[in-house]
Amino acid sequence: MTMAANRTEQALARLADLTPRKIVAELDRYIIGQAEAKKAVAIALRNRWRRQRAPEVIRDEIAPNNIILIGPTGVGKTEIARRLAKLAGAPFIKVEASKFTEVGYVGRDVEGMVRDLVESAIDLVRNERAQDVEDLAQDRVEERLLDLLLPAPSELARTETPASPGAAKPGQAAEPVSDPVDRVFVASASGSVTAEHDAARERHKRTRDKLRQLLRDGQLDQREIEIEVAQRAIAPLDLGSQQGAPDAMANLGEMLSELLPSRKKRRTVTVADARRILLDEEFEKLVNQDEVVTDALDRVEKLGIVFLDEIDKIAGAKGEMGGPDVSREGVQRDLLPIVEGSAVQTKYGLVKTDHVLFVAAGAFHVSKPSDLIPELQGRFPIRVELKSLTEADFVRIMTEPENALTRQYAALLAAEGVTLEFGDEAIREIARMATQLNSRMENIGARRLHTVMTTLLEDVLYELPERGTAPVAVHAEMVRERLKAIADDEDLRKYIL
């Protein structure tokens, strides 16, 4: 518990250098505009660190400032929450509130989001631990691969396997890649065979060193070897796979599988595949699963972030009754204890949600935040309205972020040796077209840029393998020509969603 707590403290310590201004600056690298939303989430994240530095007598009383992000689709709500979690190294999941409302009341148990968050935390912590021991694991895998490629000469291994000196050890290839040294006894007057053993050992070492270099250079990746692979037994019944089964049943098959004994099976695979399989085995040996679980549960309770999308879909106008809408208020009441803080049973133990940060989001085209039940409204004290994206925002989105759309398409064409360049006028024309389409059709925000860019470069991407490697220059005239049919046609849905 102490080691896990120390690791969680290290994660919290990383937040010490992340002042709200720095958090906003980091978000600005990937998300254009929405300064108010960035400011709100930056404060909420910084408060996680501040709470841990508060006196213990009041620490548990400080509740997280849950946030509702209000705005149309495609303006950056999900991206803000995802980047925030990545920046903090916090467990993060995105769930859709509409998943909890299905016709006939067949939906997910709301506590399932906490179980998903725990699984996310376990993956996060396991990856961190794996990085800590990666060098040691790689060294062990290299030695195991060399044992498979070049088993020890029989006279060197005969003391370990006297009954069958030529047999391979468990996990070793039955037939060596290189011819083993034959068993030769050269006895002196006193009967000593030490000199011959030393010579065989030296020859084996030289060959092994040569193979090691070939292995590191990747020249043996396609060679086939035989390894033993552990196969987990499959449970005879998986109740969690049935439609409508509660989340508590979903892990039953996995739990039964863990109780059944695993079996070993010999498989012939390439060295590259064997490296991956053996690396997973070494990580299993080197990473203490109990410590991973303890650390993950602690991190969920102190740093966990749940992004609850489409919360407007469970907010019905006052007085609505009948039909599938009758379940909306029920889902809100089920969410209430999770958001305000309760203990949720998972297969790893109880998890308290008192200090998990909940970031809800919704377009609220039909309903309003005030249509949520008052108790749930009170659990989301911070409300931020995100602005619709303008033409100027689209220009910035295509040029400023590190993962800008223009850079993504340039990388796709570069994979085939073709250079893609966008002129300034072309980018402004694309932004103008996207803005026009959003105003004439459904406003889907920055996602409109994807549809415009796909249509613009459709012919180029299709003809790319045969057209050669001549550079592709996108200019304003090309944009107008390629998208003229879309701009002039009133039935835009025929061309672009």
Image: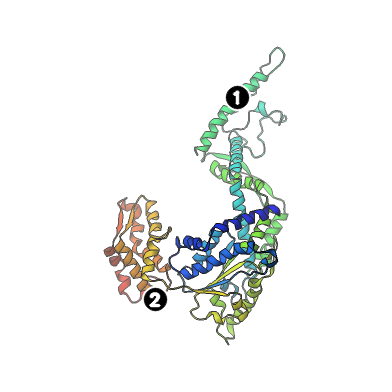
Query: Label 1, on which residue?
Result: 202
Split into 4 quadrants, where in the image is the N terminus? bottom right
Q: Secondary structure at mark 2?
A: loop
Question: What amino acid is labelled 2 in the image?
Answer: Met
| Residue 465, above or below 251 | above
Residue 330, percent from left and from top: 63, 79
Q: Secondary structure at mark 1?
A: helix
Residue 173, percent from left and from top: 61, 37
| Residue 51, above or below 267 | below
- The reply to whether dot 2 and dot 1 touch (C-beta < 8 Å) is no
Residue 258, percent from left and from top: 70, 55
The tag on residue 104 is: none
As drawn, is 255 to the left or to the right of 33?
Answer: right
Picture quarter containing residue 254? bottom right
Residue 477, percent from left and from top: 26, 64
Crowding around mark 2 (Cα neighbors within 10 Å: few <14, some 14 to 19, many 20+) is some
Is residue 241 among what the camera can see? no
Question: What amino acid is labelled 1 in the image?
Answer: Glu
Is residue 389 among what the camera can see? yes
Residue visible at 42% across and 70% down in the picture:
445
Picture quarter containing residue 411? bottom left
Residue visible at 61% across and 77% down in the picture:
378
Residue visible at 37% across and 51% down in the picture:
416
Query: Label 2, on which residue?
Result: 441
Crowding around mark 1 (Cα neighbors within 10 Å: few <14, some 14 to 19, many 20+) is few
Residue located farthest toward the left when viewing the structure as drawn = 477
Split into 4 quadrants, where in the image is the C terminus? bottom left
**Front in this rendered view, residue 220 or 434:** 434
